Image (spheres, helix red, strand yellow):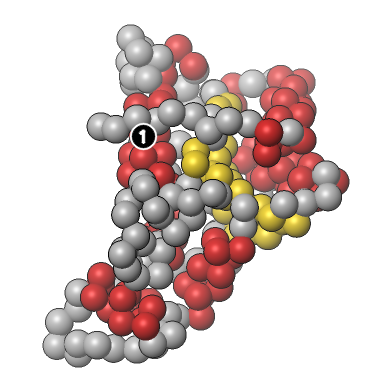
Amino acid sequence: MKILIVFAHPEPKSFNGALYRTAVETLQEQGHEVKTSDLYQMNFNPVSDRSNFTTVKDHSFLKLGMEEIYATEHDGFAADIHTEQEKLEWCDLLIWQFPLWWFSVPAILKGWTDRVFAAGKIYGAGRIPYVSGKFKGKKALLSLTTGSSESYYVKDGDYGDINGILKPIHRGILEYVGFSVLQPQLNYEVAHLTDAERKVLLQKWSERLKTIFEEEEMQVGKY
């Protein structure tokens, strides 16, 4: 199978970096094809503006959705966006590896989504959200770390249920364009763990990935 891993952490030696490398190595050992987007290493530009395009429909007023549709019709996406869109279209499984920052993804990953998930190309164009999205039949998985303990991320915890926190990503982004969402890989308070504890988490991640295509999708539900 074909897997795209999008990695969003500024420090390669971080635990996120270890999770990222573990995923690449495990999946390749299982015979899968793996492509990656290491956003910080790539110095990926997260700002969505006219630099997204090599074409222009309206010089006088920038309406991103309209320009995205025009670029779709005229092969007008900038090279960096075009490359990432090709990876998305290629993969059977999309994995995002990131630290949870302010209850969401790092800005560079949100910017990647803003620029790459373009109207006409990735959604729209007659496709019905959640029903007939472009990536119907593909799967997506969030692998993330937190700074706080698991007790903060339960229904009655200070931060609330982690699945509620991730719902804007699961439902509002991934399912919207057709992906089936797998249970997230959650690694809590990693900065406070011992090396031995981190090794256990990495091993659990590796073991899970060996049978990842056998997993059933999770039921995210509507808002």
> In front: 14, or 86?
86
Q: Is residue 169 left or right of residue 9?
A: left
Reading the image, the residue beneath label 1 is 167
Picture coordinates of residue 45, whole percent (x, y): 44, 68
Picture coordinates of residue 65, whole percent (x, y): 25, 70
Q: Secondary structure at mark 1?
A: helix
> In front: 132, or 66?
132
Q: Is residue 96 above or below residue 79?
A: above
Residue ID at (33%, 19%): 160
> In front: 192, or 83?
83
Quarter of the image where the C terminus is located: top left
> In front: 182, or 166?
182
Q: Residue furthest left?
A: 60
Q: Quadrant of residue 221?
A: top left
Q: Is residue 42 left or right of residue 122?
A: right
Residue ID at (43%, 50%): 178
Question: Callout 1 environment at 10 Å: few (<14), some (14 to 19), or many (20+)?
Answer: some
Picture coordinates of residue 52, whole percent (x, y): 38, 77
Picture coordinates of residue 126, whole percent (x, y): 31, 64
Residue ID at (19%, 87%): 58
**Residue 169 shows in the view:** no
Q: Quadrant of residue 119?
A: bottom left
Q: Is residue 74 above or below residue 211?
A: below
Amino acid under disc 1: Lys
